[in-house]
Amino acid sequence: MRLIYSLLLFTTLVLLTACGKENLSSGRELVGSWVDVNHTADTLVFFKKGGIVVLLDNSLTYRTIRQNSTNFDLLTNQYEVRMGGGELFTRPLTMRETGIENFFRGKFEWVDGKQSFSVEPNGFRPYLSCTGCPQRFRKID
């Protein structure tokens, strides 16, 4: 009887723990190059590196801010990527803290199947204050 009680308690704890976790994907479906449909000088490049998906922000926005700010880290345009719950999660590769609470978030939505997507730029450009102004990117390779 004690064994059954222990197994039930253990199973309940495991289920509660598993249900509390966010279901995040690696962002593998984003691998490739994407161009902003309204600003063709803005591209995002997603690639695999060391078992994670990395976002390289190769946008005019980033290049302009980097050019005008001496305190801006050169690798701030490279982010580890996660996706889940209609959001894009990113954190700078230079950030040492782990845990989803250390990721930036932006609303994310696939458009036209998976040939384009809409994302709020504050999900990967934390230096912008842009909630409710999504950008749309289409796949170019």
Image (cartoon, rainbow, N blue to C red):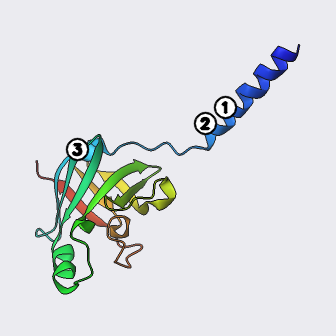
Q: Earlier in the sequence, mark 2 or mark 3?
A: 2
Q: Position of residue 114 (x, y in %)?
A: 26, 45
Q: Nearer the viewer, residue 31 or 115?
A: 31
Separation of residues labelled 1 and 3 (CA atoms): 32 Å
Q: Secondary structure at mark 1?
A: helix
| Residue drawn 22% across the image and 81% down it | 65
Q: Is residue 113 visible?
A: no
- The residue beneath circle 1 is 14
Figure quadrant of residue 78: bottom left
Circles 1, 2 touching at the beta carbon (< 8 Å): yes
Amino acid at dot 2: Ala
Expressed as whole percent of the image width and height from the top left, the position of residue 53 reads 28, 47
Q: Amino acid at mark 1?
A: Val
Is 17 positioned to the left or the right of 50 in the image? Answer: right
| Residue sitting at x 38%, y 56% | 88
Residue bearing mark 2: 18
Q: Position of residue 52 (x, y in %)?
A: 30, 44
Q: Is residue 55 visible?
A: yes
Which residue of the protein is positioned furthest toward the front in this rendering?
Answer: 96
Q: Residue at x 34, y 77 (%)?
A: 127
Above/below status of 139 relative to 133: above
Q: Which mark is residue 32?
A: none
Query: Which amino acid type corresponds to the residue marked 3 in the rendered image?
Result: Lys
Q: Which residue is mark 3?
A: 48
Q: Quadrant of residue 77?
A: bottom left
Q: Camera-side residue: 125 or 140?
A: 125
